[in-house]
Amino acid sequence: MTLDRGAALARFTSASVASLGTTRESGSPHVVPITFAVDGETIHSMVDQKPKSTTALQRLANIAARPEVSLLVDHYEDDWTRLWWLRADGAAEIRRAPTEGCGAEEAAALTALRRKYPQYERVELLGPDALLVRIAVTAQRSWCASEEGSAALLAYLSPGAVRDP
C-alpha cells in the first residue's frame, strides 16, 4: 500500500536519519547513514567538521562520478503489519559551503539543518573542508504493510511521539 505524496513527504522530512545510496565507479552499491533537511523538492546534507577517518569520502567520489542517488527512511517492528519505508531518488551535486557569505540556498540549508539537529550547535558546519550535498528529488516511492503500518507511520510523526534511536 502506498502513501499519498504529501503524507510521504511529511513523514520523510520528520525522519532523523536516512540511508544514502550511491554507486561506485565499478557499479557496486555504497550505502551510508546521513542527517538531512528537506526544502520542497530539494534535500540537503552536510559533510560537517566532526572527525572522520578520511576526508576523501566514498560517497563524494561516487556522487562526482554518478550523481544519481537514493535516500531511504524505514521502520521495522517484529509486528510486520507495522512496517513502512519511504524513498526519494534524485540527482546529487556537491557544493562547497564557504566560511562566509553563503548563497541564499546554502544559508537556508544550514539554518534548516541546525534547526533539525541541535547537535550542530556544537559541531562546526562551516570551514575549509565543509561541503553541502544538494539532492534535487526526481522521484518518490513509499510503502506500508497495511493500515496498521500506515497508522504506525502516522504515530511516528505525532508530536511528542517516542522514537527508537
Image: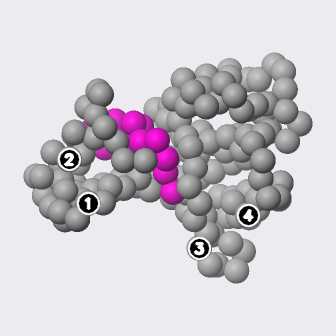
Q: For the stretch drawn in magenta, what is the main secondary structure?
A: helix
Q: What element carries label 2?
A: helix
Q: What label sits on residue 58 in the rendered view?
A: 4
Q: Residues within 10 Å of mark 4 (few under 14, many from 20)?
A: some
Query: Is 92 placed left or right of 43 in the picture?
Result: right
Dot placed on the residue nearer the N-terminal end, 4 or 3? 3
* Distance between mark 1 and mark 3 Cα atoms: 26 Å
- Disc 1 to disc 4: CB gap under 8 Å: no
Cα separation between marks 2 and 1 = 10 Å
Real-space Cα distance between discs 4 and 3? Answer: 11 Å
View extreme (right): residue: 128
| Contact (Cβ within 8 Å) of mark 4 with mark 3 | no
Q: Residue 152 carries which label?
A: 2
Disc 2 residue type?
Ala
Q: Which of marks 1 and 4 is nearer the N terminus?
A: 4
Question: Label 3, on which residue?
Answer: 29
Quadrant placement of the N terminus: bottom left
Extent of the magenta region: 4-19
Evaluate if marks 1 and 3 touch, with contact meaning CB atoms under 8 Å apart. Answer: no
Is there a contact, CB below 8 Å, between mark 2 and mark 1? Answer: yes
Tell me the amino acid under the disc marked 4: Gln
Disc 1: CA contacts within 10 A as few (<14), some (14-19) or many (>=20): few
Would residue 102 be visible to someone looking at this image? yes
Q: Name the residue under label 1.
A: 77
Mark sitting earlier along the chain (2/1) = 1
Q: Where is residue 159 in the image (x, y as percent from the top left)?
A: 29, 27
**Residue, x 84% and y 33% (percent of image)?**
127
Q: Residue 110 vs residue 89: left or right?
A: right
